[in-house]
Every structure is written in C-alpha cells, then in structure tokens.
Amino acid sequence: MTRTALNLTPDLHTYAQAHSTTEDGLLAELAAETQRLFPDRTSMQIGADQGVFMTMLTRVMGARDVVEIGTFTGYSTICLARGIAPGGSVLACDVSPEWTSVAQQYWQRAGLGDRISLRLAPALDTLRSLSGEPTFDLAFVDADKENYIPYWEELLPRMRAGGVVLADNTLWRGEVLAPDSPDSPAAYIHSFNEHVHSDDRVETVVLTIGDGLTLSRVRSRD
Ligand SMILES: C[S@@+](CC[C@H](N)C(=O)[O-])C[C@H]1O[C@@H](n2cnc3c(N)ncnc32)[C@H](O)[C@@H]1O
C-alpha cells in the first residue's frame, strides 16, 4: 500500500469513467455542441466525471441554494441544478450573452429553466449586490482566475455553516508548482490555494479530479 496518489494514466481515467455513472444524452449533446460552436474554448467546460461528482455532492449535501461563478454554455449549471433539493435554485453568474444563450436553451430542454436564474454582469458586482447574510449552501467558482481570492472573500460570509465552496482548476495543469510569471493564471491560482489553506473558517481538500477541484467546508461560526 502507498500513501501517494495513483499515476492516473489515460487508460485508467477511461476505466474510472466507464465504471462511474455516465453523462446522459443531453449533457453529451451540449458538450458536442459546445465543441462545434466554440472549438477553441471547449477546455473551459468541466469534464463528465466532474459533472457526475458535482451532481452527487449537491444531492448528498441536500443543498438548496447554490451560486455558480462562471457558467459558459451551462454544463456545470445543469449538473448542479439536477442535484438541488426541492424548492432550491442556482444563481448562475457570467458576462457572456453569446455563451450563456446556448446554456439557456439547454436548461430549458433539461426542464431546469425554473431552477436556474442567470445574472449577466461581472460576478463580483453580482455578489456584492446580494444580502451579506449566509444564504448559500454550495458555491462553484469557475471564472477569471485573478478574481478567485475576491470571489472567496465575497462568498465566505454568504455561506451557511456546513456549506461548501468548490473552486475549479486549482492545479492548473500542474503549473501551480512553478508558475512561469507572477501574473499568469497558475500564479493567481497558487495564491488562491495559499489563501484558502491559511483560512481557518474552512476545512479543505484539494481533489485531483479534472484540473484540480478544491472543496472547502465552512465551519460553524460559534
Ligand atoms: C471556465 S468558463 C466556465 C465553465 C463552466 N463552469 C462549465 O463547466 O461549462 C469561465 C466563464 O467565466 C466567465 N467570466 C469571466 N470573467 C467573468 C466575470 N468577471 N464575471 C462573471 N463571469 C466571468 C466567462 O464568460 C466564462 O463563461
């Protein structure tokens, strides 16, 4: 037995996916349409395995009130919205009318139109316009990397005790080990990782799913 992680080869990743719940036809169609419409941007979308994980986490938590920072064509939003408890909703934040118009078509087709509301504005403005009270059970951060720390600081007071903040791309293709410049995405992500690690309002695990997914659970404030 070893305490280090497996070397996840492409074959082993395929095997793990093949033995997990698979994405359904609608999500597969959305992934294919995103590839067709925005071929240079496909890597922005979360993978199928991460989507299954996020639906399951949302469901297991019984999350009701969810916020997503960075929606693109709406794949991750569907994964979150499918997991929320009855009466819950996802507030989806993005700045692109073009990308989110695809998202809105697929939300309707998934029968989730009434569980998702879209805010087209810089997400920091959207967060600052909300009540400062704890209102969210789950947050997913997947937008501009230079703003991950400001997103974190706006989100934390708005998270319920026991709530979870998920942050995507926190291993940045491995480049967090040696960012090539101080203003690269890898450097911003490394600063975010240090920031979260030193924050005792949360307990945190960096999952090696996808491009790195940090899961931070908000401790009770008492
Ligand atoms: C990596 S993509 C999100 C991918 C999406 N979560 C998915 O899995 O399909 C990042 C998104 O963040 C959005 N974005 C960039 N800067 C933003 C900002 N300041 N406020 C809100 N959204 C922003 C972009 O328009 C883009 O759609």
Image: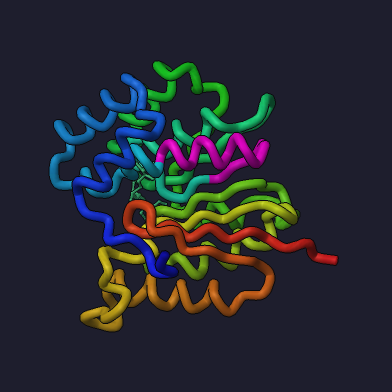
Relative depth, front residue between 82 and 157:
82
Residue located at (30% from left, 38% from top): 99
Q: Position of residue 109 (x, y in %)?
A: 40, 16
Q: Which quadrant of the structure image shows residue 59?
A: top right
Q: Position of residue 179 (x, y in %)?
A: 26, 79
Residue located at (27% from left, 61% from top): 7
103 is higher (above) or lower (below) than 162: above
Looking at the magenta stretch, what is its main secondary structure? Answer: helix
Relative depth, front residue between 108 and 50:
50
Q: What span is in magenta?
A: 51-67
Residue located at (57% from left, 65% from top): 204
Quarter placement of the N terminus = bottom left
Left or right: where 40 falls relative to 179: left
Residue 57 included in the magenta stretch of the image: yes
67 is higher (above) or lower (below) than 115: below
Q: Position of residue 194 (x, y in %)?
A: 48, 78
Quarter placement of the C terminus = bottom right
Left or right: where 77 falls relative to 13: right
101 is higher (above) or lower (below) than 93: above
